[in-house]
Amino acid sequence: MKILFRTDASSTIGVGYVMRDLVLAKQYGEEEVVFATRALKGNINRTIKEAGYKVKRLKSNRLEELVLLIKKLKIDMVVIDVSTIDYVFEKELKEITGVKIMVLDDLYKSHHCDILLNHNIYADESRYKELVPKECMLQCGEEFTLLSDELYSAKENRKESPKDKINIFLSMGKKDSAGLNLPILTGLEAFPEISINLITTTKNKNLKELEAYIADKNNISLHIDSKEIGKIMASCQMAIIPPNATLHEVNFMELLFIPIQTSDNQKEMVCFLEANEYPVLKEFDNEVLYHTIKSFIIFHQQ
């Protein structure tokens, strides 16, 4: 079977779509997989190639261009992970090419597809009843969460840590667009006994400021563009993160976590967490963060 992944990454879209597609692509084993992406600013096409997949560059997001590529490559199934592709596009694609269509969706939009995957822990299959064809196969919820092999390996090899040892995994996004890393670190000064693993990338515009702050802090380790996220998580007991894809990872690793909302597209996750009576900060509040960490420490040491 020939499978085409239609996805994009850029400095504005982010890289999350492509990264989860790479995890999904690996599940198809020996099947022939090709990626079709636009050469947008900040794309990670090199990462796709390094993972061993061919990349076909698209000039636009037009249906006609994708149809031509599908026919040329004799594609059997298209995996669509582009938020701007809608029901009308998918229906026309199906009618013209007859390919099997799989769609990744996070926001309960209407789709014309054969398979729909919502891998979020909050995914509710019943909400798609009127949004997809009756024969569509729905894959929703935690059992379908896309996680890297590195995470599985890290969890399997994790060693139990002493009750008096507290390591925090701090990651507020690859770019920390909300600028919360430094305020959080400042707040954590109230817990000198805690070790902090700060995860960020070279795309963080405040990186130099963070490096200067950390320079004389023995309890803070700075990880830039790390490829060992699972290993770092496995050494931690708590996490401070946005309620996004990273939450799936820390949940899988069974860490206590404090989610801090940083954008509107995290509302579904926030609602799910609140419905399950899990503490969520809808905006950064140093005092609330302090008391939440304090309660987590007491819980962990019991």
Image: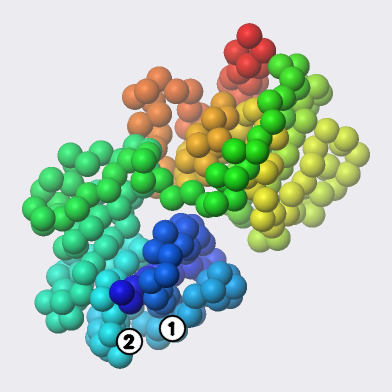
Q: Secondary structure at mark 2?
A: helix
Residue 215 in the figure: left or right of residue 281:
right
Question: Residue 99 at x, y = what percent?
Answer: 20, 74
Vertical arrangement, residue 302 with respect to residue 79, above or below: above
Task: Judge whether residue 66 can be spotted in this image.
Answer: yes
Question: Residue 221 at x, y = what percent?
Answer: 79, 42
Q: Which residue is identified by label 1?
A: 56
Task: Judge whether residue 285 can be spotted in this image.
Answer: no
**Reading the chain from its start, which is encountered first: label 2 or label 1?**
1
Query: Which picture quadrant has residue 240?
Result: top right
Who's the residue at 88% across and 44% down the image? 215
Which quadrant does the C terminus fall into? top right
Question: Residue 174 at x, y = what percent?
Answer: 61, 54
Who's the residue at 57% across and 30% down the image? 255
Vertical arrangement, residue 172 with respect to residue 103, above or below: above
Question: Residue 56 at x, y = what percent?
Answer: 43, 83
Who's the residue at 18% across and 81% down the image? 97
Marks 2,1: beta carbons within 8 A: yes
Who's the residue at 55% across and 35% down the image? 253
Observer-nearest of 216 and 27: 27
Which quadrant does the N terminus fall into? bottom left
Q: Which amino acid type corresponds to the residue marked 2 in the rendered image?
A: Leu
Residue 109 in the figure: left or right of residue 232:
left
Disc on res. 73: 2
Observer-nearest of 255 and 150: 150
Vertical arrangement, residue 74 with respect to residue 112, above or below: below
Spatial CA distance of label 2 from label 1 is 10 Å
Farthest residue, direction right: 216
Q: Which amino acid type corresponds to the residue marked 1 in the rendered image?
A: Lys
